[in-house]
Image (cartoon, grey):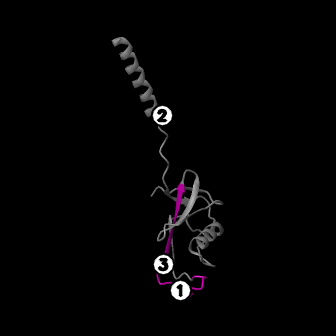
Amino acid sequence: MKTYFLVIVVLSTFCLNGCISQSPDPTPKLQHALLVEPNKAAVSIAIKTLVHIQEAQLASDVFTTSSTVTLNNVKGNNIIDTQSRNTADQFELMIKGTQCYIRHLDSKATIELKEAKCKINEL
């Protein structure tokens, strides 16, 4: 009887140990990124979507040397926000796996940047 009980305990331990060791890899987190190639058009569309504006004046090399960009005096296009805002809007380019994202720093709203290729910003 003792042998039978010992066998059950040992087998149970091995089974539980196997379940614990098969935990999935952690989900990768968003990291700061840079564009591999300039893509002003895709970035402009994403930023306009995030903050609901009609026009965004961007440099042709946006997000190629820095993970962040600041837009000053953005004008809203809705009825409530008809005057120029005094605060600057900041955005950051992020990467998760191989997918690029742009995040609005104030609202934390994030949009996928499908047409662009990014790499992790090592700085």
Residue 60, image x and y in percent? 61, 71
- Quadrant of the image for the C terminus? bottom left
Residue 35, image x and y in percent? 58, 60
Residue 21, image x and y in percent? 44, 33
Which disc, if any, is residue 88?
3
**Magenta-drawn segment:** 76-95
* Tag 3: amino acid: Ala
Which disc, if any, is residue 22?
2
* Tag 1: amino acid: Ser
Residue annotated with mark 1: 84
* Front residue (pair 115, 6): 6
Specify the quadrant of the image occupied by residue 95: bottom right
Residue positioned 47% across, 84% down in the render:
86
Mark 2 in CB contact with mark 1 (< 8 angstroms): no
Q: Is residue 22 above or below residue 57?
A: above
In three-dimensional space, the C-alpha distance between marks 2 and 1, rounded to whole angstroms, equals: 54 Å
Which disc, if any, is residue 65?
none
Q: Is residue 86 magenta?
A: yes
Front: mark 2 or 1: 2
